[in-house]
């Protein structure tokens, strides 16, 4: 005869406790590993934009990739997208032309009250990345709302902000933004810059009348220290997403030399005030996520936080420095 010994209740409870302890130790590590993997994907995404910019530079005589259509000229096979009255509207026509041709979105109308440079500059590089539109790689893997919009770009949910026409554009936007001086010149006319922060709103620009899209790579004095593209919201380094301009944010960045990293904003030079470029002061913005409705909340819980412009508004523009050295006076302070 043979005897079989079963687990006692105490032994079973001990085994369960050991398993629970191991899970408690391993799960945070696994979560951290997943988060690090998503950061790596994000860095790859933004570095690909830099690689595409190199291809654009080679083909177009050192130009920084940007919307290049000029006013009062005909470029498009769509008659309504020709002969724009100014540079901002010509750029918007070029963006709509790309989406109609490459994404088959003939239903996107001509838009006259927006600029495409902040959320749609990646469209210019599509020929160098051979992406479909919308392209998953242009969304941070933590940017769930944009990924959801991309998945059903003809009927996006949740409904994007803005007019019905603008809602059709949002699924083709990107998590990553290009710095304004990459497409707007560091020139001052009548005491004002080509592009400025509009009424301190973090999402709005004031556009001057100077030409857009004529910047060149050889204008960058410190390519390893000047941010080129950046993640508008840091989705990786904290428990909740942060607007890039918070001091403790570490948004994904790519520099003009092609290197990518995630530097803390407070380690960056504070930049300048494009509205008053001759001043020693720096840009401050009102971060109010309620404006668009899908941005992360303020860090303080208040409706609005005041934040610093940092590398979005580098003193000296393309000639200036963001990280690794003190801010320099490139002739704007006087």
Image (cartoon, rainbow, N blue to C red):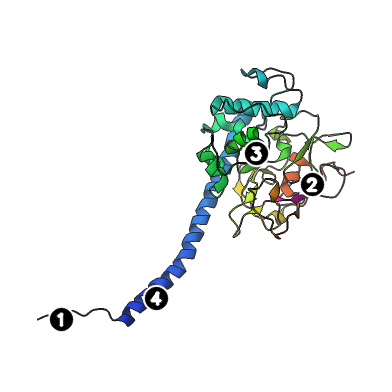
**Distance from label 4 to label 1 (Cα)?**
28 Å
Residue position for label 2: 200
The answer to whether the residue labelled 2 contacts the one labelled 3, judged by CB atoms less than 8 Å apart, is no
Can residue 214 be seen here? The reply is: no
Q: Which residue is found at the position 35% from the left and 75% from the top?
A: 15
**Distance from label 3 to label 4 (Cα)?**
50 Å
First in residue order: circle 4 vs circle 2: 4
**Distance from label 1 to label 3 (Cα)?**
73 Å
Q: Is residue 182 magenta?
A: no
* Range of residues picked out in magenta: 276-288
Residue position for label 4: 17
Residue position for label 1: 3
Residue position for label 3: 119
First in residue order: circle 3 vs circle 4: 4
**Distance from label 4 to label 2 (Cα)?**
55 Å
Query: x%, y% of residue 78?
Result: 62, 19
First in residue order: circle 2 vs circle 3: 3
Query: x%, y% of residue 310?
Result: 74, 49
């Amino acid at each position: 005869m043979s005897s079989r010994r079963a687990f006692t209740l105490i032994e079973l409870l001990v085994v369960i406790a050991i398993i629970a302890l191991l899970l408690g130790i391993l799960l945070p590590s696994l979560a951290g590993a997943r988060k690090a993997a998503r950061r790596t994907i994000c860095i790859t995404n933004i570095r690909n934009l830099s690689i595409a910019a190199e291809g654009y530079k080679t083909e177009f005589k050192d130009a920084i990739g940007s919307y290049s259509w000029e006013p009062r000229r005909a470029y498009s096979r769509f008659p309504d997208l020709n002969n724009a009255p100014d540079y901002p509207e010509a750029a918007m026509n070029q963006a709509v032309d790309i989406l109609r041709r490459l994404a088959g979105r003939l239903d996107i109308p001509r838009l006259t009250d927006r600029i495409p440079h902040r959320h749609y500059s990646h469209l210019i590089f599509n020929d160098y990345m051979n992406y479909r539109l919308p392209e998953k790689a242009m969304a941070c893997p933590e940017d769930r709302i944009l990924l959801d919009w991309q998945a059903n770009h003809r009927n996006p949910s949740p409904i994007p902000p803005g007019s019905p026409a603008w809602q059709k554009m949002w699924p083709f936007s990107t998590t990553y933004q290009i710095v304004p001086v990459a497409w707007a010149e560091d020139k001052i006319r009548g005491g004002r810059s080509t592009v400025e922060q509009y009424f301190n709103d973090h999402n709005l620009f004031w556009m001057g009348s100077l030409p857009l899209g004529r910047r060149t790579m050889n204008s960058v004095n410190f390519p390893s220290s000047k941010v080129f593209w950046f993640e508008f919201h840091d989705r990786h380094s904290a428990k909740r997403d942060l607007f890039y301009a918070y001091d403790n944010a570490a948004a994904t960045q790519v520099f003009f030399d092609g290197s990518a990293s995630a530097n803390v904003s407070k380690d960056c030079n504070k930049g300048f005030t494009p509205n008053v470029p001759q001043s020693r002061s720096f840009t401050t913005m009102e971060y109010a996520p309620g404006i668009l409705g899908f941005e992360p909340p303020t860090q303080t819980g208040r409706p609005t936080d005041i934040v610093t412009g940092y590398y979005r508004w580098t003193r000296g523009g393309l000639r200036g420095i963001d990280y690794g050295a003190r801010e320099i006076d490139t002739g704007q302070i006087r």
